[in-house]
């Protein structure tokens, strides 16, 4: 379908990496809007501007003096609200190490307490405006109090992330820092543009440990990304234990790109990822890529091939050469078991079945396969998601079926069958590879990444709109956006972070902030403020010359 790079001499790349990063032109520090806390000012007396937040909140009204947190600050949670208690836990886990404050969590005293301004930080569910939807929240900082109010746990978690960005960058440190800890005064009223804001991580081409995935979740949650799509299987490795099919992980997980040892998640590992993500408001969307991209499964279970002969394990980066045998019954026994196991282990609504680049099945075979597999997914009660190739085969509500979600990835205009599918009530998540594939290189010569969809600078990742990107696909068709990272050239979380930051926050902002606020010139100023936060947290990022980093 397109030219692909061949192999990547990793050692040579590492050399370019260092040289390339050091050679990045120094860019003068630009004063941040509103006297924002900037690196170099050491997070001292500076106070952030109320709109120094990514994604930019829907509405911001600064007023009054900053609120200072201190050693006596209490965290007050709505009595009897498990949602508020959960968000308070996340808040104190974030704030205690760097502030060194005890931040005791105490319940509000009674119903009228919720409407009185309290000293400290209050997390309240009573009195939340239903118009703010499932994820909206209000943050008000005035006098001696910061009040976070939302109807849902998700809303309160987002409010916590906003508060975090309104505190100085030193808040990200894991050891005690000098204050003061000032929150700018005023009111933020916020809710997302799209319900689905995702990030995809490919743990198949290079395996990532549970801790690495959890570390990535931390970074995603900071930008209100609410779905983690895990690309769990591909030609190079099968990464998730499936009861009844032990060789998938015993044999099919033992390889990865470049010949490394691979790895896989037990059901317990997967549960640990799901739970960690859920605590941070992130829903896991598991993907098993079918019927193509299946070499690892075929190595483990040769009966899934048409000739019954096991292929060689694959450690290269070509695509489109493998397939489950569409004509064998055992294939559907296998897929049924996989889909049911994943559905049982996944509390979220979505189950992704891949469906891209099935280049060695005919169109008829592909359709036959998917027409059997979609009902298997639907029988689990989950919503099926697939790469855009799947969409034409989904009946959709107008065709008497449920909604299926297609992930749009091929750059350029959609074909008519895809548009027809959307007209039947199916939806898309937009990840066009020329803007939202963060495994593309930033620029010529960048040491990591691919370039089949071109180079994707920081502005390129930010400056597009999912509701106008593709002719015929409008706002009503779009469930949301997703930043995808395939890991052919990315060996570990450090590599992934280098590709994600600073580009991923741009996709998060596209997914969350009102379209009318979308503006590169002001966004890049806000983005620059994230650098010191990543440094404090130990998150790798590329100091792109497109961003006016301070210091
Ligand atoms: C394509 C391909 C993947 C590659 C990726 C690399 C999709 C959906 N299928 O995207 O197998 O890893 O490009 O950018």
Image (tube, helix red, strand yellow):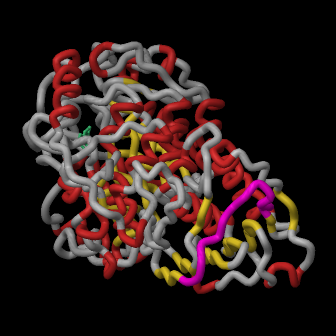
Q: Can residue 137 be seen at all in this image of the molecule? A: no
Q: Nearer the viewer, residue 303 or 243?
A: 243
- Quarter holding residue 312: top left
Q: Nearer the viewer, residue 64 or 121?
A: 64
Q: Is residue 125 above or below residue 316?
A: below
Q: Nearer the viewer, residue 394 or 136?
A: 136
Magenta stretch? 63-75
Question: What main secondary structure does the magenta stretch of the protein show?
Answer: loop
Q: Residue at x 74, y 74 (%)?
A: 125
Q: Ligand 1 is found in which quarter of the picture?
A: top left
Q: Nearer the viewer, residue 291 or 226?
A: 226
Query: x, y percentage for residue 484?
Result: 33, 48
Left-right relation of 96 to 191: right
Query: x, y percentage for residue 77?
Result: 80, 65
Left-right relation of 105 to 178: right
- Quarter holding residue 230: top left
Q: Can residue 92 be seen at all in this image of the molecule? A: yes
- Pick out the residue farthest to the right: 109
Left-right relation of 14 to 44: left
Query: x, y percentage for residue 297?
Result: 40, 25
- Quarter holding residue 150: bottom right
């Amino acid at each position: 379908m397109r030219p692909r790079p061949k192999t990547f001499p990793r050692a040579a790349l590492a050399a370019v990496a260092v040289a390339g990063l050091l050679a990045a032109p120094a860019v003068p520090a630009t004063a941040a809007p509103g006297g924002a806390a900037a690196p170099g000012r050491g997070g001292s007396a500076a106070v952030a501007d109320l709109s120094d937040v990514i994604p930019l909140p829907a509405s911001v009204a600064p007023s009054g003096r900053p609120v200072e947190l201190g050693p006596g600050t209490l965290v007050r949670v709505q009595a009897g609200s498990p949602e508020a208690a959960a968000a308070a836990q996340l808040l104190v886990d974030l704030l205690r190490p760097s502030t060194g404050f005890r931040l005791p969590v105490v319940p509000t005293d009674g119903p009228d307490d919720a409407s009185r301004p309290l000293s400290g930080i209050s997390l309240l569910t009573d009195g939340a405006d239903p118009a703010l939807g499932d994820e909206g929240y209000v943050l008000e900082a005035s006098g001696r109090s910061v009040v976070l109010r939302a109807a849902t746990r998700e809303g309160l978690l987002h409010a916590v992330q906003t508060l975090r960005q309104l505190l100085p960058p030193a808040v990200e440190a894991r050891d005690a820092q000098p204050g003061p800890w000032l929150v700018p005064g005023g009111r933020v009223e916020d809710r997302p543009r799209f319900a689905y804001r995702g990030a995809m991580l490919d743990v198949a081409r290079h395996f990532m440990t549970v801790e690495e995935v959890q570390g990535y979740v931390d970074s995603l949650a900071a930008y209100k990304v609410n779905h983690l799509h895990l690309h769990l299987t591909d030609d190079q490795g099968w990464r998730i234990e499936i009861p009844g099919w032990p060789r998938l992980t015993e044999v099919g997980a033992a390889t990865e790109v470049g010949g490394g040892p691979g790895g896989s998640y037990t059901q317990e590992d997967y549960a640990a990822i799901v739970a960690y993500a859920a605590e941070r408001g992130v829903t896991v969307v598991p993907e098993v890529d079918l019927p193509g991209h299946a070499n690892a499964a075929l190595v483990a279970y040769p009966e899934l091939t048409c000739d019954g002969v096991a292929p060689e394990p694959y450690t290269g980066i070509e695509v489109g050469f493998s397939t489950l045998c569409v004509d064998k019954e055992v294939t559907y026994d296998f897929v049924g078991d996989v889909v049911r196991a994943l559905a049982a282990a996944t509390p979220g609504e979505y189950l992704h079945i891949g469906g891209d680049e099935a280049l060695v099945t005919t169109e008829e075979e592909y359709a036959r396969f998917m027409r059997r597999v979609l009902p298997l997914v639907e029988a689990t009660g989950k919503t099926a998601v697939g790469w855009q190739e799947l969409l034409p085969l989904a009946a959709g509500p107008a065709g008497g079926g449920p909604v299926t979600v297609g992930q749009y990835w091929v750059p350029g205009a959609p074909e008519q069958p895809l548009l027809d599918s959307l007209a039947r009530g199916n939806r898309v998540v937009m990840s066009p590879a020329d803007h939202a594939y963060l495994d593309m290189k930033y620029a010529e010569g960048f040491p990591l990444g691919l370039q089949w969809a071109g180079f994707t600078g920081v502005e390129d990742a930010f400056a597009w709109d999912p509701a106008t990107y593709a002719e015929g696909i409008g706002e009503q068709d779009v469930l949301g956006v997703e930043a995808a990272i395939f890991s052919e050239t990315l060996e570990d979380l450090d590599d992934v972070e280098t590709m994600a930051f600073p580009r991923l926050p741009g996709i998060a902002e596209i997914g969350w902030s009102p379209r009318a606020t979308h503006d590169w010139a002001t966004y890049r100023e806000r983005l620059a403020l994230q650098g010191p936060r990543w440094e404090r947290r130990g998150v790798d990022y590329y100091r792109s010359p497109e961003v006016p980093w301070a210091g």
